């Protein structure tokens, strides 16, 4: 599943390609791609004739401001890519692939196409004057953004106090911190020198501050690389990211640590594969 860096890469691509995009026509090819309104035809009618404004990201959600031709606020367009959702920007017509779910055109014939192999991705229209969380209910459960001022070592210590949950599992909890998934949890724990099995509540202030800093650094590095090669993620041109070649531990079980030469370990934690170095992480 795309994580924060991949979603941020898509956000930047959408901002570049579709800011000011005047929606002329919308076609929904798979009804389950539209979470709200209930009838996909209402989604199509709601977006038609509106202009796409600024794109935002909240955790792994994408949110676009919508405007009338006169510039008045006209609600928001929400998207979650889930496991395999991706946008393609097409300047001219191209044959459909069988996994195309939603198509959006402007008056010049340019198309924004949503393709989703597993069909778990979703879209929402949030009417003007309605809170995003009232329609996109998953937003209510999100913790702070990793880059936000409220995501601190002190915050982590308070939230994790007394917890026996492995720190790797805690990092995957979107109510603790928004946008982090398996790849960057493994990578940030390596950078911080903390084993994924460590009980969350046993980590002191210095460990948690180091983890916070490592997580921010790893996410920033991956955003700079355009995301990772490890997931099904693609940007608007159909290209995946370059972070995979820089990974320290993720999917490197059995390989030698690039820092110390020890064999990278792999273990299931909470149903997810975790990777770590037994020498660099303790």
Image (tube, helix red, strand yellow):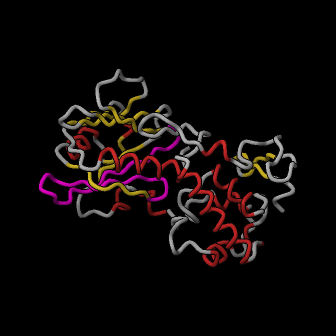
Q: Indicate the quadrant containing the C terminus: top left, top right, bottom left or bottom right.
A: bottom right
Residue 19 as seen in the image, left or right of residue 172: left
Residue 135 covered by magenta stretch: no
What count of labels does the image hold?
Answer: 0
The residue sitting at 71% across, 46% down in the picture is 250
Vertical side of 67 occupied by 199: above or below: below
Q: Position of residue 17 (x, y in %)?
A: 32, 44
Q: Is residue 25 left or right of residue 190?
A: left
The quarter of the picture where residue 216 lies is bottom right
In this view, the residue in front, 98 or 113, is 113
Question: Which residue does the image show at 63% across and 53% down from the upper left?
Answer: 184
User: Hey, which quadrant is residue 113 in on the image?
Assistant: top left
Residue numbers of the magenta segment: 58-84
- Placement of 32 over or under 220, stated as above or below: above
Quadrant where the image shows the N terminus: top right
Q: Position of residue 242 (x, y in %)?
A: 58, 42
Residue 36 horizontal/vertical position (percent): 33, 48
Residue 101 position by quadrant: top left
Toward the top, the furthest residue is 95
Q: Residue at x 74, y 57 (%)?
A: 190
Q: Residue furthest left?
A: 70
In this rendering, position of residue 13 left or right of residue 241: left
Residue 28, x across and y down, in percent: 30, 34
In the image, 191: left or right of 143?
right
* Pick the front one: 49 or 140: 49
Q: Does residue 170 lie above or below 86 as drawn?
A: below
- Residue name at image x 33 percent, y 30 percent: 29
């Amino acid at each position: 599943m795309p994580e924060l860096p991949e979603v941020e890469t898509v956000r930047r691509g959408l901002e570049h390609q579709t800011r000011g995009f005047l929606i002329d026509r919308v076609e929904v090819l798979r009804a389950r791609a539209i979470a709200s309104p209930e009838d996909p035809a209402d989604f199509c009618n709601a977006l038609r004739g509106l202009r796409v404004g600024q794109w935002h990201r909240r955790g792994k959600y994408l949110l676009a401001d919508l405007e009338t031709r006169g510039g008045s606020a006209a609600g928001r367009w929400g998207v979650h890519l889930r496991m395999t959702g991706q946008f393609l920007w097409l300047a001219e017509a191209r044959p459909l692939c069988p996994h195309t779910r939603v198509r959006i055109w402007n008056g010049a014939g340019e198309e924004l196409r949503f393709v989703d192999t597993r069909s778990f991705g979703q879209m929402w229209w949030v009417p003007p004057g309605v809170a995003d969380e009232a329609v996109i209910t998953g937003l209510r459960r999100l913790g702070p953004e990793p880059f936000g001022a409220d995501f601190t070592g002190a915050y982590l210590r308070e939230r994790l106090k007394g917890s026996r949950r492995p720190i790797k599992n805690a990092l995957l909890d979107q109510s603790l911190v928004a946008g982090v998934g398996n790849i960057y949890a493994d990578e940030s724990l390596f950078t911080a020198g903390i084993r994924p099995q460590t009980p969350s509540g046993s980590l002191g202030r210095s460990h948690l501050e180091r983890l916070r800093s490592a997580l921010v650094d790893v996410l920033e590095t991956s955003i700079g690389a355009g995301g990772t090669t490890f997931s099904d993620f693609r940007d608007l041109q159909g290209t995946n990211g370059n972070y995979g070649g820089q990974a320290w531990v993720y999917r490197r079980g059995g390989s030698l640590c690039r820092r110390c030469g020890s064999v990278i370990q792999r273990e299931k934690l909470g149903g997810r594969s975790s990777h770590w170095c037994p020498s660099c992480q303790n």
